[in-house]
Image (cartoon, rainbow, N blue to C red):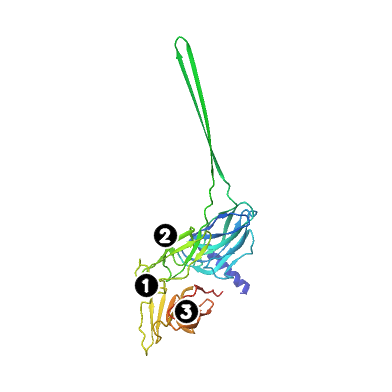
Amino acid sequence: MTYRSTMKLIALILLIGAVFSVVQATTITAEGGTIPTVGETRDFPIVADEFPDGLLGYSLNATLTNPSKAEIVDVLFPEWAPSYPFSHHTPTPADEVGIRIFGYQVDSGQTNVTLAILRIRGDATGQTDVNITVNTLQDGSGTRITAATVPGTVIIGTPPTTTATTTATTTATTTATTTATTTATTTATTTATTTATTTTTTAPPADPGYLSVFSFPLKATATIDGTVVGVTPLMGYRVSPGTHTLKISMAGYADYTTSVTLASGGHLQLPLIILQRGVPGTTPTQTASPTPSTSVSPTPTATATATTTATATATTIVTTSTTPTGQTGALAINTVPRGVTIYLNNQVRGTSPATIYGLSPGDYELKLMKQGYKTQVRTVTIEAGKTTTPSLIILTPIM
């Protein structure tokens, strides 16, 4: 069989699998809003309401139905998206763009997932719809999803003023007749007309803000203003502009509570939240790295290593040495995907997510390896009495 014949056979098998493996799981919405001034640009996200079985990738088109009023000048990808070429869009500015993300999995059960953000410029006063066409949408196992789409409306310029006019007319007629020796007839007619004009201007609703939260351990419950909104990682969750109370909680850990302020149309990504061991419902007095559940007191002549499994997906490694207490530091590593092997100076120190304690101050070579992904190597600096926490590290799949 020739190479070309083999490729055709593979493509046919994939097509048959896509036809017979289809699930209905999500609704994709193009968020609308207002661009107050002609020539101004605003960001409008494309959001999926839920992915019960996760997300492996997608391909879709976004189209402006009235291109004389606006234009798509750029496409922004969410924080969870992999780098180019796994995340890609067709050239801009344009009235229609194709957008693709492939090779990265959103966990099962995620809700309000931002797929992409359209940066749109208003070119003339008026309005245009944003239509979404889904070409491909696959869940975490690669099964094709058929999704419903909801268009959005973008209004350019100040909305028209609404004028309400009320007219009230009252007519009163009185007739009195008295008969004696003579007959007198008196007729009185009164007409009153009242006109009231009320002018009402309705301000456009404020665009929502977007919040992304990562925690260690993962799968912690996220609550905003007393309402549970999902589990971590919480990516691109829509929140009304203003200040809100965020609580991250998990069984076996003390609650983490903080205030977050979101601007209209803005995206706030919080630093990695590390939960401390404790009683649920209590708030820790400090936001340092979690204290390991197993510890070994250092002795002048011995070195001991203890490994404690905190959750099904998180391992804490505690290393003690002859270094005096308070003169060592720690390193907290969180990666996507999880289960990445961690090397420090070419020594295996566990798998991610993990916090490595008892490290002498100084520079270390950090190497992260996992089969099927590109190895990442970087330098980290450990300081005495502190926990060094790099930003969430995303490994790129090998295609």
Residue at numbered disc 1: 277
From the top left corner, tell me how far across and down residue 158 is, in percent. Answer: 59, 50
Q: Earlier in the sequence, mark 3 or mark 1?
A: 1
Question: Mark 2 and mark 3: span between their CA atoms?
Answer: 38 Å
Residue type of the residue flagged with mark 2: Asp
The CA span between labels 1 and 2 is 24 Å
Give the x, y percent position of residue 199.
54, 43
Residue furthest to the bottom: 301
| Residue furthest out toward the top | 181
Which-is-in-front pick, marks 2 and 3? 2
Instruction: Tell me the CA gap for discs 3 and 1.
Output: 24 Å
**Quadrant of residue 217 within the rendered picture:** bottom left
Q: Amino acid at mark 1?
A: Arg
Disc 2 residue crowd, few under 14, some 14–19, many 20+, Cα 10 Å: few
Q: Amino acid at mark 3?
A: Thr
Q: Give the labeled residue for mark 2.
A: 225
Q: Residues within 10 Å of mark 1 (few under 14, many from 20)?
A: some
Q: Disc 3 designates what residue?
A: 341
State the residue in front, 251 or 303.
303
Identified at 51% across, 23% down, the residue is: 189
10 Å crowding of disc 3: few (<14), some (14-19), many (20+): some
